[in-house]
């Protein structure tokens, strides 16, 4: 065993070289219309997913779509791989997530048929992750990820509410997670609106990250409207902040989003849509730098009221109740035709188990180290951990 450990050469950094983002989503499991803890019904995802899967850690496994599936305290959760931040990155991440949903729904359908049961996935939450890094060469000057999270709690909620939440929603959260910022919200049963939300979040977070200070005084300097009386609360899970419905003078999720009922600091009385609109207009260029054309137009249409927000509806739509069936990925959509990102292509090769020839050795992928590196089994019985950044240059040969 000692000799084998000597052969292992973990050479990969813990962080990616490029700015990156990713998505996570959670669903509650209904079996014959009764809510069921997936860990009680299934020991692990392997109990309903057929075929070979690459093990991740514990009871989590990589899916053929590149993401990972696991159970988390009563819900089924899927995480996408990382995507380098570039134009269309959120659409690629959204496609990956909804492809994973389609795969899991298909495996549950097969389990239903075998056991004569009926399962449903009910939308619960979505998490939008953006890597954190200060601009190269700039001093920190007190700019910490914790302070950035608090500042974003004053900026993101209104536009995220408009794109991602519904009448029964309770809040939008921002959590510092070491080397990334995580925005928490409701699961959105529309791939297009989820991608729009992710695009907006990536654009705003990366822009605010470059501000010279994360003091709340920056809000007035940049003309960001803030509702009078709003005071974020500590996040209910992990560290961070939450813009919960009772952090406002009234419930923003049940109000008329076009009624100017919100007194703001320095901007008079505005509607929720107007608050979201002013925020989006301020960040329009950075959002555009990461948006695909379809999503860029969709964000503008929802904010202007030309396309409906879920908050325009009287209640939470029925699509939440059967994710993967009542709402599903459309492989013919404009965003579906985007090419795959380099990071995604590396992960897809790895989870497929496809061998790589490198430095005269044949390497067989056997696992991942976080989302930043692939673990390979070498021909000489040793193991090697290689950063996905270092594998990008080998994609052409690997894919052949």
Image (cartoon, rainbow, N blue to C red):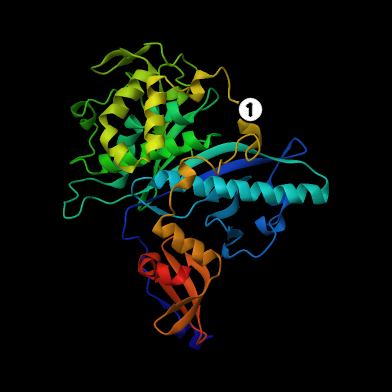
Q: Nearer the viewer, residue 397 or 385?
A: 397
Residue 82 at what x, y percent from top left?
43, 54
Give the quarter of the figure containing the N terminus: bottom right
Residue 293, picture quadrant: top left
Say left or right for 104 vs 299: right
Locate residue 8, reporting x and y percent. Answer: 45, 80
Residue in the foreground of this view, choosing between 353 and 188:
353
The residue that appears at 59% across and 46% down in the rendered structure is 101
The residue closer to the viewer here, 317 or 89, is: 89
Q: Which residue is mark 1?
A: 318
Q: How many marks?
A: 1
* Residue at (29, 43) in percent of width and height: 206
- Residue positioned 26% across, 26% down in the render: 224
Q: Residues within 10 Å of mark 1 (few under 14, many from 20)?
A: few
Q: Nearer the viewer, residue 303 or 23?
A: 303
Apparent side of residue 122 relative to residue 363 in the rendered image (left or right): right
Against 329, is 216 above or below?
A: above
Q: Which percent across, then down, holds residue 282?
A: 26, 29
Residue 337 visible in rendering? yes
Which residue is farthest right? 116
- Determine the secondary structure under disc 1: helix
In this rendering, the answer to whether 133 lies above or below 5 is: above
Question: Which quarter of the figure has residue 174?
Answer: top left
Q: Quadrant of residue 318?
A: top right
Q: Is residue 185 visible?
A: no
Q: Residue at (55%, 69%) from the top-left corner?
A: 353
């Amino acid at each position: 065993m000692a000799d084998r450990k000597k052969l292992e050469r973990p050479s990969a950094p813990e962080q990616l070289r490029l700015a990156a983002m990713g998505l996570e989503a959670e669903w509650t499991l209904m079996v014959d219309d009764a809510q069921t803890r997936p860990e009680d019904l299934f020991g692990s995802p392997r109990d309903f997913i057929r075929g070979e899967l690459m093990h991740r850690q514990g009871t989590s496994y990589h899916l053929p779509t590149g993401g990972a599936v696991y159970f988390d305290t009563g819900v089924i959760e899927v995480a996408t791989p990382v995507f380098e931040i570039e134009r269309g990155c959120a659409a690629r991440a959204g496609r990956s997530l909804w492809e994973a949903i389609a795969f899991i729904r298909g495996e549950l359908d097969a389990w239903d048929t075998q056991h004569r049961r009926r399962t449903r996935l009910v939308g619960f939450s979505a998490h939008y992750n953006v890597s954190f890094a200060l601009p190269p060469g700039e001093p920190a000057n007190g700019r910490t990820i914790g302070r950035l999270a608090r500042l974003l709690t004053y900026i993101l909620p209104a536009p995220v509410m408009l794109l991602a939440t519904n009448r029964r929603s309770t809040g939008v959260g921002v959590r510092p997670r070491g080397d990334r910022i995580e925005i928490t919200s409701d699961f959105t049963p529309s791939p297009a609106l989820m991608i729009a939300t992710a695009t907006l979040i990536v654009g705003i977070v990366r822009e605010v990250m470059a501000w010279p200070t994360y003091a709340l005084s920056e809000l007035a300097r940049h003309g960001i409207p803030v509702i009078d009386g709003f005071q974020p609360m500590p996040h209910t899970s992990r560290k961070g902040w939450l813009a919960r419905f009772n952090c406002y003078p009234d419930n923003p999720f049940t109000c008329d989003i076009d009624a100017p009922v919100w007194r703001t600091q320095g901007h008079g009385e505005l509607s929720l849509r107007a608050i979201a609109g002013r925020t989006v207009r301020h960040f329009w260029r950075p959002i555009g730098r990461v948006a695909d054309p379809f999503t860029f137009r969709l964000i503008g249409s929802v904010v202007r009221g030309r396309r409906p927000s879920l908050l325009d509806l009287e209640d939470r739509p029925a699509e939440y109740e059967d994710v993967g069936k009542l709402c599903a990925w459309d492989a013919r959509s404009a965003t579906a035709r985007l090419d795959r990102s380099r990071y995604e292509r590396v992960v897809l090769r790895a989870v497929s188990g496809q061998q790589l020839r490198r430095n005269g050795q044949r390497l067989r992928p056997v696992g991942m180290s976080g989302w930043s590196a692939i673990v390979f089994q070498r021909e000489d019985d040793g193991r090697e951990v290689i950063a996905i950044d270092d594998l990008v240059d080998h994609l052409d040969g690997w894919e052949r």
